[in-house]
Amino acid sequence: MSSSPGIKPAWEHVDVMYISIEAAIAVASVLGNVLVVLVVCVNPALRNTTFSFIVSLAVADIAVGVLVIPLAIIISLGFNTQFYTCLFLSCLLLVITQSSILSLLAIAIDRYLRIRIPTRYSTIVTQGRAYVAVCLCWILSFLSGLVPMIGWNKHEIKHGNLSRSSEIVCEFTTVMSMDYMVYFNFFGLVVVPLTMMIILYGEIFRVIRGHLNRRAEATCNGDKYYRKELKVAKSLALVVFLFILCWMPVHIMNCISWFCKTCKIPKMTMYVGIFMSHVNSALNPLVYAFRMKRFRETLIQISRRCMCCKARQSTPCPSSLPPTTEKVAVNL
C-alpha cells in the first residue's frame, strides 16, 4: 500500500477529485459491510464457521471506510507531525489490509476442509475454533503491520538527525521503507497467502468436479451437496479474484518505485491504484448479495421489514426474522 505525495498549499483539481471519490468509496464500504454484519446477526442460519470469517472480512472492510480511507486522505495532504506519529498512522493502513488477506485465507481453508472431510468437518471445525482463528488473524495482522514501528522504517536513513519532537511532512513514502513494503509486505504477506488461496480453490474445484463426474456412484443428496459447495466456492473464489485485481496495481507501483529508482509514477496513476485498493471493500457485499441465495433472501427480508416500519410507524415491527429450517451447508 502506498500513498501519494502531499498536497501543496494550492490544491490541484486532481487532489479535490481524489478526496471526493475516496469519500464516496468510504460511505459505500461502510454501508455495504454493515449490512453484511447485520444479515448474519439477524439470521441464525448464517451463523456458521464460514460466515464467522466473512464477518471478520466485513469488519476489516468497515475499518477501510472508517479508518483507512480517512487516514489515506490525511496522509495525502502532507500535514506536519512527528515521525513516529506519521509512521503509526501508516502502519494502521497495513494492519487492516493484512486482516483482509488472512480472513480470505481462513475462508479458503474452511471451504477446503468442508469438501475434503465432509463427514468429520463439523467435529473438527467448531464455532469456538472459528472464533479463535478469527482472533489469530487479527493478532497476526497487528504484529506484521506494526513491524516498521520497531525499526524497519526510514527514520535512520532520511531523518537520522531529527529529534523525537521534530516534525516532518507526513507522507507514506517518507516514513515507510520500500524494501519492507516490497519484500516483507508484498512478497511475504500478500503473494504467499494469495498463492495458497489459489492452490486451495484449485483443489476444491478439482475435488468437487471429481465427485460430480462420478454421479452414478453418488447418492442424490451427495450430488446436491457438492453442487451447492461448487456454487459457494465459485462465489468466494470471485471475492479472492476481485481482491487480487484491486490490490495488484498499487503493489506493482511499489515494486516499480523500489526496483527502478529513476522511475517517476504520475500522481493520477498512483491515485487510481489507491482507488482500486479501497473500492475492493465496497465490492464484497455485492458479491454476497448477487451470488449467495441465503444472504440475498435475508437482505430482502430486512429491506421489506424496514419499509414496513416506515409505512406503519405506529405498528411495532418484529425484532427478528422468521426462523428457517433449511440447512446452512446447502443454502449459502
Image (spheres, rainbow, N blue to C red):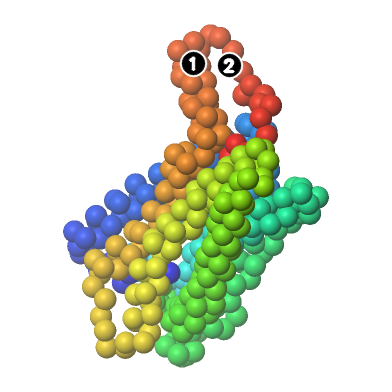
Dot 1 crowding, Cα within 10 Å, few <14, some 14–19, many 20+: some
Secondary element at tag 1 = helix
How far across and how far down the image is residue 215, in percent? Answer: 61, 46
119 left or right, relative to 26: right
Image: 151 above or below 326: below
How far across and how far down the image is residue 237, in percent? Answer: 50, 55
Query: In front: 187, or 291?
Result: 291
Q: Is residue 177 visible?
A: no
Residue annotated with mark 1 = 308
Give the image quarter of residue 290: top left
Q: Amino acid at mark 1?
A: Cys
Q: Is residue 265 visible?
A: yes
Whether pointer 2 and pointer 1 mark residues with C-beta atoms closer than 8 Å, the reply is: yes
How far across and how far down the image is residue 144, in percent? Answer: 60, 72
Q: Amino acid at mark 2?
A: Cys
Task: Give me the disc on residue 317.
Answer: 2
Task: Give me the disc on residue 24.
Answer: none
Q: Earlier in the sequence, mark 2 or mark 1?
A: 1
